[in-house]
Amino acid sequence: MTKNGNSLDQRTFDKLSRLYIIALSAIAFSIIISQILIRNHLNDQQSDSSVINVAGRQRMLSQKLTKEIVSLSAEASLENRMLLKDKIKKTLHLWELSHYALQNGNDSLGLPSKNSAIVIDKFKSLNPIFDSINVASKSIIKKIENTPSLPFNSFLSDIKKVKNNEGDFLLMMDQIVNQYDLEADAKVSWLRKLELLLMTLTLLILLGEFVFIFWPTAKSVRTTLSELLQAEQKAKKMAFDADELSLTREKSIKELRALSHAMDDTLLFARISPKGHVIHIGNKFSRLFNFSSFNNEVLFWNVLSNKESEQLVIEDVVFKHKKTGWQGEIKASTKDDETIWLEMSIIPFSPTDDRTELLIIASEITERKTAQLEIDRLTKKSFENEMSQQKIISSKIIENQEKEQNRIAKDVHDGIGQMLTGLKYNLESIDIKDIDKTAAKIEHLKELTTEIIKGVRTATFNLTPPELSDYGIVPAITKLTQELAKLTGKNIVLFNKTDFNKRLDSLTEINLYRITQEAINNAIKYADSTHILVSLSHSDNLLSIVIDDNGKGFDPNKVKNVKNAEGGMGMTFMRERIKYVDGRLFLNSEAGKGTRVTLNVPI
């Protein structure tokens, strides 16, 4: 029901009735007005065809009258003259009647009495000519009627008048007919415009009705129907829910009774006061902790343990969380000093408005907790072993770094240093006076200088190459393969499959370079390979570097099992480096079939 007491259907019906009455009335009004205007115009045009027809006939009648009058001169027979006179009289009567009807109107001829100002002016000019022809024609008729045997010369002057005025009459009558035709066309054109205007007005009315009446009405109807359907569904649901609620209430009461009994027998369930005094304790709780009777002064934590430290922990948990609730693990003990672990929940609730209690729901997790403690112990032991292994690896890395530094120092001292010393002595021993010996020593100095430069390049090449910091990983590996190919004489080739040329962060680039360098050096030193292929490829988020050789290969499992000996430490360093950049390293090898090392790093 609405506020005014009407139903939603009645209100909607009244609104729709008003809107449709307005819409239909507007359409009917526009149609009636259109019909009135069109019919009025059609009534005005109804006589246009008659006017044009009569006006056009006037020209024919004037020509016929003139022809009949002129024909008198050729009629010698009195009888034929009288017949011709009757024709002239009849033609003159129709011609005269039509002439005045065009100006003054005539109901029998269907001619209106209203002409335009232009037509009236043209008739004013035409009337004197008409009168001359009319008077001459009547004079001829009268003379023949009075004296049929008069000679032709008696009305020759009247015939000349008719002939002389007949051309002017035709000319001016043509102008009048043309004017009638123009006015008729103008009325038709105006009627077309009127019809277009009325059609446009009707379409605008229909559009306005659609926008302001029909479309809002359709939306209102749809909304109303939706409200009615929702109200109906809501009413049905309320009725159904009422029945279900009644059944559910009865069922809940039964279930609560059964649940209360089941909780006492199957769950570790208890109710305590906010101060910790036991109000009720379930049968299973009682059996677990050998508690058979209690009074209102028994404290809950005294039931769960006879150890003071455990009691203090439980007491602290209860008092801290008695308003907010709590869930966690509690250590308890029975009267036989058996340790029991409980996963316990404390739930505050108010059975009445003026009283609060705490629900205790627990489950025994002694076995699970024991297993968890054992797992923690084993995990800690495993972690200590892993840390110990990591220390061994770290020490080997440091030892390897020291060896590398000593090797570089030795190369510089024994190689470059000795060659520089020789260069110094050779320079000091040059005697510029002895041209031949000086030239030979200079050639020797050139060779020595070339060796020094080669040694410096080799030493610096084993350090971080400048291409790596300046241009990135691809130019650095390109330089690495080219230099090692020159130094070792092996066929070492780089193939950039996807034209990778991006820069990575410095940590990733140096580790990728060192791993690739280590893999190539292993293939050179230990695999007896002649061909080494380094392949690069990448996707949107992954860079892959693959080092293949055709060497003798090995069993990867033996390398994995080496923990602290010299063998296999190169692979250990490679795996450690790949971890630093969140990448992955894959090693595939088989005796006699070469080795493949694959590096995958995110980009």
Image (tube, helix red, strand yellow):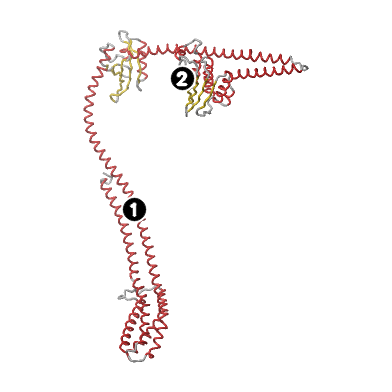
Q: CA distance from mark 2 to mark 1?
A: 78 Å
Q: Residue 157, image x and y in percent?
A: 40, 88
* Residue position marked by numbered label 1 in the rendering: 209
Q: Quadrant of residue 322?
A: top left
Q: Residue 192, image x and y in percent?
A: 37, 63
Image height of 516 relative to 46, above or below: above
Q: Please name the amino acid that badge 2 sits on.
A: Phe
Q: How would you rate the neighbour count of disc 1 (Cα within 10 Å): few for under 14, some for 14-19, many for 20 or more?
A: many
Considering every residue shown, the one lying at the far right of the view is 433
Q: Is residue 75 visible?
A: yes
Toward the viewer: 39 or 551? Answer: 551
Q: Is residue 309 left or right of residue 569?
A: left
Nearer-N-terminus badge (2/1): 1
* Residue position marked by numbered label 2 in the rendering: 586
The residue located at (36%, 62%) in the rendering is 195
Q: Is residue 128 visible?
A: no
Toward the viewer: 257 or 102? Answer: 102
Q: How would you rate the neighbour count of disc 2 (Cα within 10 Å): few for under 14, some for 14-19, many for 20 or more?
A: few
Q: Residue 101, image x and y in percent?
A: 34, 77
